[in-house]
Amino acid sequence: MELHNGLLFWPSTFVKKQHSNPPIKPHYDAIVVGAGMSGVLTAKALMDEGLTVAVLERNELGYGSTAANTGLLQYSNDIQLHELSELIGEEDAVRFYKLCYEAVDQLEEITSSLLDQADFIRRPSICFASKKGDVKLLEKECEMLVKHGFPAEFWNELIVEKRLPFKAPAALYTNNDAEVNPYKLVVSLAEQLIDQGMDLFENTFANVIENEGNEVILRTMNGDFKASRIVYTTGYERLPYGTMEGADINRSYAIVTEQKPSFEGWYENALIWETARPYLYMRKTMDNRIIIGGLDEKKASPAKHETKVDAMASSLLDKLHELLPNETFHAPYKYCASFGESLDHLPFIGQHPQEPNHYYLLGFGGNGTVYSMLGSKIIADLIMNRPNADARIVTLDRKYGIK
């Protein structure tokens, strides 16, 4: 399945090293299938445990959903905390939000050792009310966040007008989020792990997966792999093993503008999004561009025709000019990308209910990178047979999961 179509921005910011696939070892402690954000973070977590790890990628490192990821790292989710509390209970909802909050700290620690720190920068977030009817939702969400120790404050209409270049009836300001260049993060981290002994196999598709005693056998055109454990981090691609229930694949659009010397009225260079569903979101880049995305459609495959991508890019530019009325922008980069959402708004992380050697980290939802980070820790604990009290929240053995 093609995951995106159009001209992507992130691959233009970083030159990926070219290398040949290494010889296949007789046995690996773990094989990770998928070399995107989830795959590389999982490989790091397992290597930190002293395990021998191979990562298999059917295409090229970091060029799936990672290359189309807009790089907003937020602890808030597509479903607000008070709404998630109604679905899974307040205790579990708050714990999940705290896992997301901690994951941003963990990503900062990882990027601190990478080239250019993968452009990781701490940013606040501003979620503005798309209409007056959403004001009470933001008030309720702010109360819930503050109650549980999250840094948040409510802005009324007058504060919004003072701090932002556009009008909105209210906004929720939260702190300790971040932005990152996701392509740099994945490629740089993978190169670091290769230097530490990870085996990366690009253009290697797992044709057949078999269980043989306590081992898993992966048969590919490049040879057979044997491992004690296998972790599927295939994102929104079709699963090579198992069946997913309770997820939708949709598509979204994004543009990246030309560089500008400065922008007036962008409060603290915050990550900006809104309460409408589907929502618009935008951020700045290190070289002073703007990324704005949204206009989601309930279609799995990216728009194939250039005219469709151009039309949606034009709509995003119009939205951007509404939000920054004193500026004029063009969009040299524009694309459409597929993304996954789970019906219960949680990622799929854990051990297959019937197959003890098979594990999954599928970060379905608006916070895919954050989910990948927290999920890699859960997977490492499960594989090392350590208790993890949080695994039950995202378990595959729930109403929506992997069967």
Image (cartoon, grey):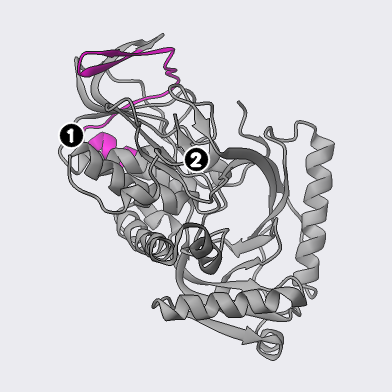
In depth, the one of 254 and 359 nearer the eye is 359
Compared with residue 59, is residue 88 higher up or lower down, i.e. above or below? below
Residue bearing the label numbered 2: 400
Give the magenta range.
190-218
Residue 214 part of the magenta segment: yes
The residue located at (54%, 39%) in the rendering is 65
Query: Which quadrant of the structure image shows residue 379?
Result: top left
The residue located at (71%, 63%) in the rendering is 276
Compared with residue 166, is residue 11 higher up or lower down, i.e. above or below? above
In depth, the one of 249 and 112 nearer the eye is 249
Neighbourhood count class around disc 2 (C-alpha, 10 Å): few under 14, some 14–19, many 20 upward: many
Position in image of residue 321 (x %, y %): 79, 67
For this orientation, the residue located farthest to the left is 50
Position in image of residue 17 (x %, y %): 40, 34
Query: Which quadrant of the structure image shows residue 198?
Result: top left
Residue bearing the label numbered 1: 51
